[in-house]
Image (cartoon, rainbow, N blue to C red):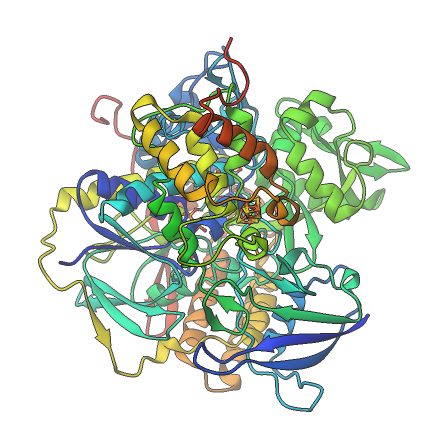
């Protein structure tokens, strides 16, 4: 009997699997490593939902508005409506599977997070992702014991199996034996963000290589907003990667400053008196970039947490403090820390509709690999939510399709598969360098054209294998998307077009055409009225 | 900084292991065994001390910040996380070997599936809705932190793959279940805990000292033993 094939076992993949299993639909969960090693375990600060346990009169509509505004009105409003309405239920579900959120009198405590006017972020100290994952993994295990979920760790997605415009399965390689199999059935991609195209330069894991997105793009899957890359304002450099300092540090009272004429200048507080240090991430990161360019300012921005109460450190941020002491050899309780912007999240990715369908029939996608919910900038705490909710939503769509699962589960592959060859790390580094030269916090036409020129020269340098060619195409889509979007919005800031332009309030659509990336723009859906949105 | 990496190589489970020595130089004093392995693999043109090419070294990594357990291996005779092992603390010669209690795959990669098999056998999940409120929150939080790295099993005198005793990588997450288990499931969970943990554990706590996540294993054990064996209340007293 065949099964639904889920690629990726982070929050999105697990959520999809659990919700399919609850409906008695068997699925296979493929991932490079076990769920315990997925990027979802790194999430720190928390997860959003308008539970209103803090007596601030928060309502779902506020969450909707903050998410739309944070994403600069570039997300699908109906999808965001579903997400924000579904959020309280997701949090209650997590509570019911035993997630030890920080609680008081049996109620979940909510904290402040960037871009949100009310306390709406549930957390477990500053290891929220790990703690949620442990509970969700155990929940999936219950269905694994019943045979409904089959886990395939150390299994790599190689490519989709397509029949015309329909997806009929996935080619998978067992990394421990090297053997390859074709698994039949509908596919849900939950393969995470594209960190691997910027090796060592992001806060994420090495596991999310970007290969899945690059491959399916080259196979005809449409990408949305590939130029939208989130730089997190507060990261520190550690050996081999950027290490995140959670937004909760600012949510709990941390302040950003730079030295100006020998004085500490708390620039965010002066420039944005309402949300101050908790402006959306795109704004904070850009301000940091600009103040550093000012001639009267120093070249380092600091995060000052010296004013935080002892109880905040012990009850809410103890793990963050331990981590910072380990990496910096100094205590953030007494010494402000030097922070820099670092690549943290990909708002763009596989294009899906609000039901998590892609442009290919029987192919779905959820989680960070998709372009869904976050528009031009993701709010902190909305991404674990998006992964859990998106996984659930994609499962619901699959359930409604009533797939016939009577075929064979898999057949072994004996033919040569060119995509089994990996992309050379030296090349990945080179492409990463080119992308970084064009896709920084501040962009302009010359930078982007220059980067595209360099990319195309590199492309002509030698013969490349299939994965390498796919990476070129993905890189081109990101650069072209940024070049064509002649405006500034969210994470995409063009100094040659510094204003928002209503005519670009559209989804950037990237499509493969003869090996190269075509860019067009698609008008966003209107928000349906409340009543018709059940 | 210049170190000699002495890596136990093995092409596959079927092939015999051998030691390969690589001279590794770096200016970055924060480099870890993990970043060195990545560096060698990424550059691709390293030679060993006998001037043989260094082929791709198989190992697993993911988070590179001690939060996922992927990179557990034996470094200078102790199981540790490669990404948490700074070269400057490891001496002039760094001996790097795969974990020994698990079947070999290739080089430093081993197959740790037995850990997940065991917790499945132990019934590590909640049958019914529950809630880990603040009375048990601290215990549940601590028990949720296990990385499934396997370092504790490596040093445990009583654990072996295929045995009835499942070790700390099962006991720690089971404590999460025990801390908030509902009446209906209690008997089964306690029984599994007694059979697969309590009865086999010598309580030497070698696991406590080695755990790279610094999990307070001793405290979790006291709570789980108390609840499952002595029927004591877990966590803070309810008001
Ligand atoms: C340091 C950090 C802190 C964060 N903090 C927060 C926070 O506080 N709040 C919040 O909401 N969000 C946060 N995020 C973001 C959030 O954690 C992620 O966006 C979210 O967890 C993504 O979940 P996912 O399931 O989509 O992907 P992931 O958890 O990344 O899982 C991807 C899965 O795909 C698999 N995969 C990848 N490639 C392949 C392949 N070729 N073949 C087979 N499998 C493959 C992987 O093995 C993995 O199982 C944070 C992220 C980071 C990095
Ligand atoms: S206390 Fe000793 S016997 Fe028990 S799990 Fe730890 S190392 Fe093994
Ligand atoms: S208890 Fe500690 S040593 Fe054992 S698997 Fe968990 S994290 Fe690793
Ligand atoms: S790579 Fe995650 S613990 Fe070392």
Q: Residue furthest bottom?
A: B51
Q: Quadrant of residue A3?
A: bottom left
> Taking A527 as reference, is B35 above or below it?
below
Splitting the image into four quadrants, where does ligand 4 fall? bottom right
Left or right of A35, for residue B65: right
Left or right of A350, for residue A327: right
The quadrant the C terminus of chain A occupies is top left
Q: Residue at x 47, y 32 (%)?
A: A47
Please state which of residues A352 and B120 is positioned toward the viewer in this rendering.
B120
In the rendered image, residue A15, in percent from the top left (x then y), is placed at 33, 42
**In this view of the protein, can residue A86 be seen by the observer?**
yes
Q: Quadrant of residue A2?
A: bottom left
* Number of marks in picture: 0
In the rendered image, residue B209, in percent from the top left (x then y), is placed at 66, 46
> Taking A297 as reference, is A154 above or below it?
below
Q: Residue at x 12, y 55 (%)?
A: A405
Left or right of A303, for residue B194: left
The quadrant the N terminus of chain A occupies is bottom left
**In this view of the protein, can residue A380 be seen by the observer?**
no
In the rendered image, residue A409, in percent from the top left (x then y), is placed at 17, 62
Q: Residue furthest top?
A: B239
Left or right of B119, for residue A288: right
Q: Quadrant of residue B85?
A: bottom right
In the rendered image, residue A428, in percent from the top left (x then y), is placed at 54, 71
């Amino acid at each position: 009997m065949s099964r639904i094939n889920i690629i990726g076992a982070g929050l999105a993949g697990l959520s999809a699997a659990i919700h399919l299993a609850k409906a008695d639909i068997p699925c296979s969960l493929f991932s490079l490593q076990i769920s315990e090693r997925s990027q979802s375990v790194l999430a720190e600060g928390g997860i959003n939902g308008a539970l209103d346990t803090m007596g601030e009169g928060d309502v779902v509509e506020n969450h909707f508005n903050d998410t739309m505004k944070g994403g600069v009105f570039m997300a699908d409003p109906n999808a965001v409506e579903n997400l924000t309405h579904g959020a309280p239920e997701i949090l209650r579900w997590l509570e019911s599977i035993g997630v030890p959120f920080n609680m008081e009198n049996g109620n979940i405590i909510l904290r402040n997070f960037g871009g949100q006017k009310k306390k709406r972020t549930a957390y477990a100290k500053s290891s929220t992702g790990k703690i949620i994952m442990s509970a969700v993994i155990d929940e999936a295990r219950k269905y694994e014991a019943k045979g409904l979920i089959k886990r395939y760790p150390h299994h790599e997605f190689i490519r989709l199996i397509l029949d015309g415009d329909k997806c009929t399965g996935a080619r998978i390689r067992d990394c421990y034996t090297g053997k390859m199999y074709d698994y039949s059935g509908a596919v849900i991609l939950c393969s995470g963000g594209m960190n691997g195209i910027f090796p060592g330069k992001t806060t994420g894991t090495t596991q999310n290589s970007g290969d899945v997105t690059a491959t399916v793009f080259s196979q005809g899957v449409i990408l949305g907003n590939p130029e939208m890359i989130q730089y997190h304002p507060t990261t520190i450099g550690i050996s081999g990667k950027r290490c995140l300092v959670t937004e909760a540090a600012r949510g709990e009272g941390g302040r950003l400053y730079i030295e100006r004429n020998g004085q500490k200048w708390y620039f965010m507080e002066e420039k944005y008196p309402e949300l101050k240090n908790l402006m959306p991430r795109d704004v904070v990161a850009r301000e940091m970039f600009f103040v550093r360019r000012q001639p009267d300012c120093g070249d380092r921005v600091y995060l000052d947490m010296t004013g935080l109460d002892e109880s905040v450190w012990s009850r809410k941020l103890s793990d963050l403090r331990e981590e910072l002491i380990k990496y910096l050899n100094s205590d953030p309780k007494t010494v402000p820390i030097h922070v820099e912007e670092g690549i943290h999240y990909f708002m763009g990715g596989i294009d899906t509709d609000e039901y998590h369908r892609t442009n290919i029939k029987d192919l779905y996608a959820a989680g960070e690999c998709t372009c869904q919910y976050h528009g031009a900038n993701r709010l902190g705490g909305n991404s674990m939510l998006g992964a859990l909710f998106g996984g659930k939503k994609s499962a619901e769509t699959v359930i409604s399709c009533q797939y016939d699962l009577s075929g064979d589960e898999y057949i072994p592959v004996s033919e040569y598969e060119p995509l089994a060859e990996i992309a050379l790390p030296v090349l990945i580094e080179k492409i990463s360098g080119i992308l970084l030269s064009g896709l920084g916090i501040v962009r302009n036409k010359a930078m982007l054209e220059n980067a595209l020129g360099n990319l195309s020269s590199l492309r002509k340098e030698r013969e490349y294998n299939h994965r390498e060619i796919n990476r070129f195409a993905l890189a081109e889509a990101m650069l072209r998307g940024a070049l064509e979007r002649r405006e500034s919005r969210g994470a995409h800031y063009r100094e040659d077009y510094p204003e928002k332009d209503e005519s670009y309030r559209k989804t950037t659509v990237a499509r493969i055409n003869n090996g190269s990336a075509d860019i067009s723009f698609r008008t966003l859906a209107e928000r349906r009225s409340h009543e018709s949105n059940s | 900084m210049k170190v000699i990496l002495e890596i136990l190589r093995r092409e596959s489970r079927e092939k015999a292991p051998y030691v390969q020595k690589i001279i590794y130089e770096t200016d970055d004093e924060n480099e870890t065994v993990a970043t060195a392995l990545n560096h060698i693999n990424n550059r691709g043109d390293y030679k060993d001390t006998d001037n043989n090419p260094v082929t791709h070294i198989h190992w697993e990594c993911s988070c590179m910040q001690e939060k996922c357990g992927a990179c557990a291996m034996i470094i200078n005779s102790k199981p540790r996380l490669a990404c948490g092992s700074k070269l400057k603390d490891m001496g002039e010669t760094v001996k790097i070997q795969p974990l020994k209690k698990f079947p070999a795959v290739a080089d430093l990669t081993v197959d740790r599936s037995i850990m997940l098999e065991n917790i499945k056998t132990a019934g590590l999940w909640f049958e019914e809705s529950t809630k880990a409120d603040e009375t048990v929150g601290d215990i549940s939080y601590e028990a949720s932190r296990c990385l499934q790295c396997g370092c504790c099993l490596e040093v445990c005198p009583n654990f072996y793959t295929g045995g009835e005793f499942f070790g700390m990588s099962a006991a720690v997450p089971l404590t999460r279940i025990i801390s908030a288990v509902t009446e209906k499931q209690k008997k089964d969970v306690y029984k599994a805990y007694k059979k697969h943990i309590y009865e086999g554990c010598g309580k030497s706590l070698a696991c406590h000292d080695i755990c790279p996540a610094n999990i307070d294993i001793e405290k979790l054990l006291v709570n789980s033993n108390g609840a499952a064996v002595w029927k004591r209340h877990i966590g803070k007293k309810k008001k």
